[in-house]
């Protein structure tokens, strides 16, 4: 029987894919399977079944202890080849995104990364993703018999768990030792934030002149009960923020009920990240800044004047 | 030691216009992708540190690439291979990787292949991993720091939760992140001199690719539509005395029901 196979190095994201995968697999008359790779994996099987996987492959192998694309791609290839895998869904995490194309290449298959939507139309999957630097959304399809799609986290909702059982398939993988060696992992410092779940966001860009001035923004965020996000230059050039707070094409795509963009000109690179916000507000001293075209409400003015006044007003409510 | 840098010519998206939701790129100047430029810069920096390194730029693009490549040569690439055959037009990532792999095999004798982790236009991140697979090389992606010693590369990868330090023996394919370096600008005098550096052109036939395998005809994906998303925003801009302005904004946000927890 043809199969829709799911693999994610993060179980929480695998469950999102499994939840939605059920819908695709039953419409396409396929079996929904998932692969667990690495070590100490057997204990996770029941949860995969609970979200709807009908079959779970267990691939324990010394080459899979650390994530190397070399070995993980080969493992998924062997599982796919020995079974009738037609669709492979992966999360568009950094690891998923480098794994997808490599597995696809092994199969000579088409692959689409960073999918923000996958829909079934007339028995085919149509996939949407941002294109042209976020200026457009491309609807695409894959023409090969096997399709590989990496899906952005949170694209699919987590389904309900049911107490279900399925088939467990221990699989013998023939893998060479990985050709890359992980010497060490330096954990990124900084608190964990989850901008994707934030209800209110205050985002700051290059209009902020120095790091010390962040206090002004923090005060506003506190008054609003908001999380703070930032643009790419504040994150990668100035390194005032960790990547957890980066909003935009190369960072988080957020969907708060309110976002206030402060001192941000409004390049598409950033605005892609706030497109799904319900209400957008801009504060910028340049009345020609493109951010105003993306805004429901705007104030033209110096952030150092406007933000403290706004903070005071909000506190007085 | 030979370093191959892969470059793709793309329209400068700063010049994009949207009309009736359709992206229009007419007249946009062609540039190399942002992270492609990081890859080139990194190759040149390695060359400046270690003796006996040759940097070969392999670039795909249209007819204007013959001019555009001078920028890459001026920055420090020693020679270039251009993939400008009209048959290569409309390649998807899979065909692009196949074309690059054939070209790199034809060049031969490479130790390190450097690519951007994604292109500035579509950022699909596929060419690097696909190319590594086609050439049977290990891949190290999202690299923010790269060191070469002897036959070994040591790279720091920027992952979501950590910086991962990875080693591998060459030959290896590395994709670089934007923060790895700040690419230098080509100087006019170097651009003028770049004309003297060797530039070859490979056609589809030179690479053994038939017209059915190359470019748009060889793709494995199809674009059904490509439109700017619809954006309906209210565009209310408050002006005047700042105190009033702030008050008006807070009133509007209260009415929208987006304040309070």
Image (cartoon, coloured by chain):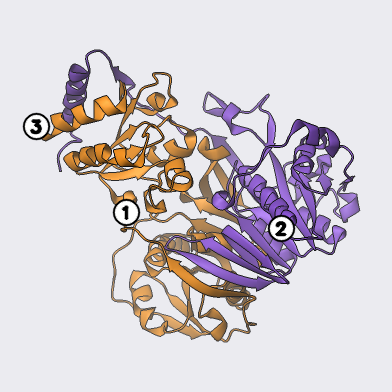
* Residue assigned mark 3: A316
| Alpha carbon separation for disc pair 1 and 3 | 28 Å
The numbered mark 1 sits on a residue in which chain? A
Nearer the observer, A248 or A232: A232
Residue A271, horizontal then vertical, whole percent: 43, 36
Quadrant where the image shows the C terminus of chain A = top left
Q: Mark 1 sits on what residue? A: A194
In the rendered structure, the colour chosen for chain A is orange
Report which quarter residue B132 is drawn in. Answer: bottom right
Q: Which chain is purple?
A: B
Q: CA distance from mark 2 to mark 3?
A: 60 Å
Q: Secondary structure at mark 3?
A: loop
Label 2 in the same subunit as label 3: no
- Figure check: B261 above or below B235: below
Q: Residue A241, percent across and down?
A: 38, 49
Q: Secondary structure at mark 1?
A: loop
């Amino acid at each position: 029987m043809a199969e829709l196979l799911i693999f994610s190095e993060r179980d929480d994201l695998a469950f999102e894919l499994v939840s939605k995968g059920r819908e695709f697999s039953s419409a396409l008359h396929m079996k929904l399977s998932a692969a667990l790779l690495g070590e100490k994996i057997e204990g996770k099987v029941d949860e995969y079944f609970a979200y709807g996987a009908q079959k779970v492959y267990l691939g324990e192998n010394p080459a899979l202890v650390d994530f190397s694309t070399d070995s993980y791609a080969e493992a998924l290839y062997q599982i796919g080849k020995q079974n009738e895998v037609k669709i492979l869904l992966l999360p568009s995490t950094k690891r998923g995104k480098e794994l997808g194309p490599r597995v696809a290449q092994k199969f000579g298959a088409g692959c689409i990364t960073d999918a923000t939507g996958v829909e079934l139309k007339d028995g085919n999957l149509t996939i949407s993703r941002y294109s042209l630097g976020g200026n457009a959304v491309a609807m695409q399809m894959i023409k090969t018999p096997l399709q590989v799609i990496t899906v952005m986290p949170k694209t699919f909702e987590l389904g309900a768990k049911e107490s279900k059982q399925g088939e467990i398939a221990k699989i013998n993988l023939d893998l060479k030792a990985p050709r890359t060696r992980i010497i060490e992992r330096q954990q990124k410092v900084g608190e964990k934030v989850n901008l994707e779940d934030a209800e209110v966001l205050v985002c700051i860009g290059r209009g902020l002149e120095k790091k010390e001035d962040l206090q002004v923004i923090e005060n506003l965020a506190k008054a609003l009960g908001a999380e703070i996000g930032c643009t790419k230059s504040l994150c990668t050039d100035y390194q005032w923020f960790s990547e957890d707070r980066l909003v935009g094409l190369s960072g988080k795509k957020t969907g708060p009920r309110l976002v206030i963009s402060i001192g941000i000109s409004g390049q598409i690179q950033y605005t892609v990240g706030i497109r799904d916000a319900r209400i957008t507000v801009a504060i910028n001293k340049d009345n020609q800044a493109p951010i105003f075209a993306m805004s429901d409400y705007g104030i033209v003015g110096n952030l150092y004047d406007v933000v403290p006044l706004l903070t005071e007003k909000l506190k007085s409510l | 030691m030979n370093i191959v840098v892969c470059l793709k010519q793309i329209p400068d998206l700063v010049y994009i216009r949207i009309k009736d939701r359709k992206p229009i790129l007419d007249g946009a100047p062609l540039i190399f992708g942002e992270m492609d430029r990081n890859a080139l810069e990194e190759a040149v920096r390695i060359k400046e540190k270690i003796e006996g390194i040759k940097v070969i730029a392999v670039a795909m693009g249209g007819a204007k690439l013959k001019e555009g490549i001078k920028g890459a040569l001026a920055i420090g690439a020693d020679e270039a291979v251009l993939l400008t055959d009209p048959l290569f037009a409309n390649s998807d990532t899979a065909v692009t990787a196949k074309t690059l792999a054939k070209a790199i095999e034809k060049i031969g004798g490479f130790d390190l292949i450097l690519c951007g982790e994604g292109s500035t236009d579509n950022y699909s991140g596929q060419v690097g991993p696909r190319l590594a697979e086609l050439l049977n090389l290990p891949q190290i992606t999202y690299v923010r720091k790269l060191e070469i010693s002897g036959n070994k590369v040591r790279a720091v990868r920027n992952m979501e939760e950590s910086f991962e330090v990875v080693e591998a023996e060459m030959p290896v394919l590395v994709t670089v992140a934007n923060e790895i370096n700040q690419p230098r600008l080509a100087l006019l005098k170097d651009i003028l001199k770049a004309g003297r550096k060797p530039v070859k052109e490979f056609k589809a036939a030179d690479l053994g690719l038939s017209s059915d395998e190359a470019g748009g005809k060889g793709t494995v994906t199809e674009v059904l539509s490509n439109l700017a998303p619809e954006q309906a925003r209210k565009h209310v801009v408050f002006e005047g005395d700042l105190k009033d302005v702030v008050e008006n904004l807070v009133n509007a946000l209260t009415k929208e029901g987006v304040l309070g927890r």
